[in-house]
Image: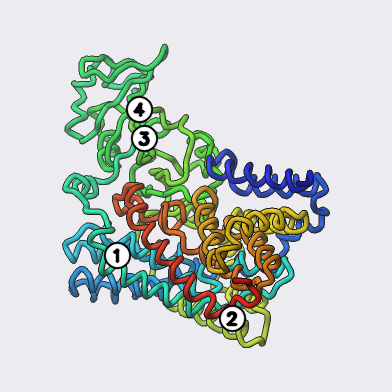
């Protein structure tokens, strides 16, 4: 083992640990990785930075813009109306229909956008069918991932894999190269969830139903301002239970004390509470209580301000920071009022809590501030504050531009990256969206992550690290045949998608897979396809953005994803093992 290989292995472990523990935001990890590769001499500076200027980055940015534009258009409202017509078909047929629509739409939109826009419609259909939304939302998210795997633009993982192929000296993937496999997996997944969903999906209890109706429990801080009528009263005198507000503790000068019903309140006391959002607002707005939500005033939560819930997406710039830091980075007229975390039971002053992926924050602000927040890729609104004005015509123009770009790219008339860029520029130059809005629709940290991890893949190949790891894989599995090699690489990729993002996992394993093919005398393409699609089809944990979006609305527990996701992941791997050698022959591999 050379010093360069040892360094790359240490960097690999360090990256996995930092991404798993969310020690730093993902874009900082990626940039730090590139800086170390260049500073150590493993890669020349120009090579280390090429990942940020690749054709893949341009394509992915354009897909983000066009996908978000379609998701925000009135076409989704039209789709919701048509979906609602299928609500009376019976639970299994309704589930199959919803998953089919999700898989189909995600082949054009990204799977995250597809899930986000379908959540309201699916929840409404579930209510019409008399079942909890949790019976439909997880399968719909699964279907969006399966359908997204069928095309190059359906998921960032496929695009990232294609870009890595080009940087490693191989032919990039075609737009519809995965179509047959993606369709087969989608059909198998829909059939499996339709037939076995009764056992795989959680049975939502009455308690969970009540919680869903009452709203998720937020943790917040009710402050006692100077001169408030609540000073001198006991906590029991406030009657917080009548507001469905549960007092957990009282923070005051000198430390924290219990929220005993007989405890008298003092000026500047802070009562740590847990309650549904409506109950919090009612309690903070009632003048008889004399309390306010910490760091805000009653006037800031009244009309015309809007209340919204937003979930922190993987890699958000606030991950690991305190809620106070997040407040300082937002517009002054946008206020963070409360926080919901599924596993948070101990009382805490939310301002000092370190934010995690999946945290839901309750915000209040004017409509223009909420609209700007909705364009922030680090947050996803769990509901629209008001019905958006109809823009179906704009959605149709965006769809036409996207279809023309795909046709131009697949027929060879233009490179796909140029065709997608022209589609975006056409919408901007025609006045259908502004350049500022365009930049706001791009998740820059995802682009930085993919650029950095792409350079890491090149470093693994040129330093001999991929060859060293490939030798280890062949030593362990080479005697079992080519299918065992494919399975081993697929399982390794799936395992890495748990602590890392799907795209990062694919970019890490791809150079190893290509080296395995080289050392075994095989065509590297089937191995690269296996790794890329294995990363796109990992359903085990709710860390993929599409799954994270349904986590709260579906009232799911972590184990629910394990119970349904593990069988579906194994089914997908089995289909990949069957079909990849058919469409991409394993030529030259010794039995």
For the point 35% across and 74% down, the residue is: 100
Image quadrant occupied by the C terminus: bottom right
Q: Which residue is denoted by mark 2 in the rendering? A: 405
Please tell me which of labels 4 and 1 falls first in the chain.
1
- The numbered mark at residue 347 is 4
- The numbered mark at residue 497 is none
Please tell me which of labels 2 and 1 falls first in the chain.
1
- The numbered mark at residue 122 is 1
Q: Please say if 469 is above or below 580.
A: above
**Are the residues flagged by discs 2 and 1 in contact, CB closer than 8 Å?**
no
* Percent coordinates x, y for residue 77 in the rendering: 35, 71
Q: Please say if 253 is above or below 360.
A: above
Please tell me which of labels 3 and 1 falls first in the chain.
1
Q: Which residue is denoted by mark 3 in the rendering? A: 344
Measure the C-alpha gap from mark 2 to mark 4: 53 Å
Which one is closest to the eye, mark 3 or mark 4? Answer: 3
Is residue 263 shown left or right of residue 355?
A: left
Measure the C-alpha gap from mark 2 to mark 3: 46 Å
Is residue 129 shown left or right of residue 455?
A: left
Measure the C-alpha gap from mark 3 to mark 1: 28 Å
Camera-nearest residue between 238 and 126: 126
* Percent coordinates x, y for residue 323 in the rendering: 48, 36
Label 3: few (<14), some or many (≥20) within 10 Å? Answer: few
Label 1: few (<14), some or many (≥20) within 10 Å? Answer: many
Label 4: few (<14), some or many (≥20) within 10 Å? Answer: many
| Helix, strand or loop for disc 1 | helix
């Amino acid at each position: 083992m050379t010093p360069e290989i040892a360094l790359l292995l240490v960097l690999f472990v360090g990256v996995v640990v930092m991404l798993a523990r969310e020690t730093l935001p993902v874009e900082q990890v990626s940039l730090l990785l590139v800086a170390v590769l260049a500073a150590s001499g493993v890669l020349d500076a120009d090579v280390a930075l090429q990942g940020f200027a690749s054709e893949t980055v341009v394509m992915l940015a354009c897909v983000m813009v066009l996908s978000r534009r379609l998701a925000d258009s009135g076409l989704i409202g039209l789709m919701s109306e048509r979906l609602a017509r299928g609500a009376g078909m019976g639970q299994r047929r309704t589930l199959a229909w919803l998953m089919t629509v999700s898989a189909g739409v995600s082949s054009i939109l990204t799977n995250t956008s597809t899930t986000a826009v379908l959540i309201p419609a699916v929840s409404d259909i579930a209510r019409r069918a008399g079942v909890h939304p949790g019976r439909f939302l997880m399968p719909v998210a699964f279907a969006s991932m399966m359908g997204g795997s069928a095309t190059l633009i359906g998921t960032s993982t496929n695009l990232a894999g294609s870009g890595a192929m080009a940087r490693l000296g191989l032919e990039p993937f075609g737009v519809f190269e995965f179509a047959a496999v993606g369709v087969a997996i989608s059909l198998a997944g829909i059939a499996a969830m339709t037939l076995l969903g009764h056992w795989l999906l959680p049975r939502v209890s009455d308690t969970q139903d009540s919680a869903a109706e009452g709203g998720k429990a937020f943790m917040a801080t009710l402050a006692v301002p100077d001169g408030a009528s609540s000073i001198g009263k006991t906590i029991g005198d406030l009657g917080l239970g009548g507001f469905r507000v549960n007092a957990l503790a009282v923070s005051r000068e000198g430390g924290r004390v219990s929220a005993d019903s007989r405890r008298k309140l003092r000026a500047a006391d802070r009562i740590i509470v847990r309650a549904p959002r409506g109950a919090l607002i009612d309690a903070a707005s009632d003048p008889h209580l004399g309390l306010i939500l910490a760091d805000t005033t009653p006037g800031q939560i009244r009309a015309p301000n809007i209340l919204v819930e937003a979930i922190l997406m993987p890699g958000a710039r606030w991950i690991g920071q305190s809620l106070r830091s997040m407040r300082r980075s937002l517009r002054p007229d946008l206020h963070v009022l409360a926080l919901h975390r599924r596993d948070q039971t101990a009382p805490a002053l939310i301002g000092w809590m370190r934010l995690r992926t999946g945290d839901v924050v309750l915000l209040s602000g004017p409509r223009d501030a909420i609209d700007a927040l909705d364009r922030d890729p680090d947050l996803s609104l769990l509901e629209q504050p008001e019905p958006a004005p109809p823009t179906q015509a704009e959605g149709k123009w965006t769809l036409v531009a996207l279809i023309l770009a795909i046709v131009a790219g697949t027929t060879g008339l233009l490179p796909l990256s140029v065709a997608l860029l022209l589609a975006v520029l056409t919408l901007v130059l025609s006045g259908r969206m502004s350049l500022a809005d365009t930049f706001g629709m791009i998740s820059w940290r995802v682009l930085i992550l993919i650029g950095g991890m792409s350079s890491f893949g090149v470093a693994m190949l040129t330093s001999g690290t991929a060859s060293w790891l490939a030798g280890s894989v062949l030593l362990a599995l080479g005697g079992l045949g080519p299918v065992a090699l494919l399975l081993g690489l697929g399982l390794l990729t799936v395992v890495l998608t748990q602590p890392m993002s799907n795209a990062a996992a694919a970019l890490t394993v791809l150079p190893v897979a290509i080296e395995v093919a080289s050392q075994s005398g095989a065509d590297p393409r089937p191995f690269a396809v296996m790794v890329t699609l294995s990363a796109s089809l990992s359903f085990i944990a709710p860390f993929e953005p599409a799954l994270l979006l349904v986590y709260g609305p579906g009232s799911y527990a972590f184990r629910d994803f394990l119970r349904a996701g593990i069988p579906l992941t194994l089914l997908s791997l089995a289909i990949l093992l069957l079909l990849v050698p058919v469409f991409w022959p394993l030529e030259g591999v010794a039995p």
